[in-house]
Amino acid sequence: MLILLIKQYFYIYIAQFQELKLIKENQKILNTANVLIDSFIIVFSYLLAYITRVNSDLIIYVESVSLSSYMRFLILIVPTFLIMYYLFKIYTTQRLKSLLEEVSKIIRANIVATAVLFVALYFSKEVDYSRFMMAIFVLYNIIFTSIYRIVLRYMLRYVKIGRAS
């Protein structure tokens, strides 16, 4: 009888270990996808901010920096934002955190990344880059990243519920 109980416990332990291993593998895949999609969102938000800035009637636009110069700045922007997302633990599992907490992390990471970029612009003496465009970019980036995370959260919940039934 005792041997059967030990054997049963052993099988349960192995099954839980295999499930945990599968969850960790799935989390790695999800994190890789998140980094790629976040990179796309950053570039898209930046391009949309540039278009908005050029076509905006709020502040007169005088082209002091070419589009290609703005696009070269993406080489610094994308890694800075991804590093901040990592440091603010946006790429850790969020299923136990509230939606408000996750969006709050996104906002804080965007603000800190923008501050880092402003400091880099200041020290490199690049004064011609539009701060207004950067503000628009950050706003778009927060909105699109938050929407993506909300949709992802509900999709994962839907998949989990479908798997459970």
Image (spheres, rainbow, N blue to C red):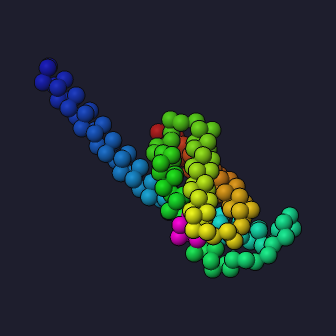
| Residue 62 spot, x, y in % from top left | 79, 75
Indicate whether 137 appears above or below 149: below
Any part of residue 30 in sight: no
Whole-percent x and y of residue 159?
A: 51, 47
Q: Which quarter of the figure is the N terminus placed in? A: top left
- Looking at the image, which residue sits at the far top? 1
In the depicted view, which residue is nearer to us: 106 or 14? 106
- 165 relative to 123 in the view: left or right: left
Q: How many numbered marks, from 0 up?
A: 0
Q: To which quarter of the image does residue 8 belong?
A: top left
Position above or below: 125 against 146: below
Q: Is residue 75 magenta?
A: yes
User: Residue at 59% across / 38% down in the picture?
Assistant: 101
**Spot occupied by residue 125 in the image (x, y as percentages of width and height):** 61, 68
Residue 150 versus residue 141 in the image, above or below: above
User: In the image, 41: left or right of 2?
Assistant: right
Judge by depth and name the residue closer to the eye, 3 or 155.
Answer: 155
Q: In percent of the image, x 24 and y 38: which residue is there? A: 14
Left or right: residue 146 compared with residue 37: right
In this view, the residue in front, 18 or 162, is 18
Kindly identify the residue that appears in the image at 60 percent across and 65 percent down. 121
> Does 107 appear in magenta?
no
Residue farthest toward the right in the current orientation of the protein: 57
Residue 111, visible in the rendered structure: yes
Prevailing SS of the magenta stretch: helix
Q: Position of residue 119 (x, y in %)?
A: 59, 58
Query: In the image, which residues are magenta?
Result: 73-77
- 152 relative to 7, above or below: below
**Which residue is painted at 19% across and 23% down in the image?**
5
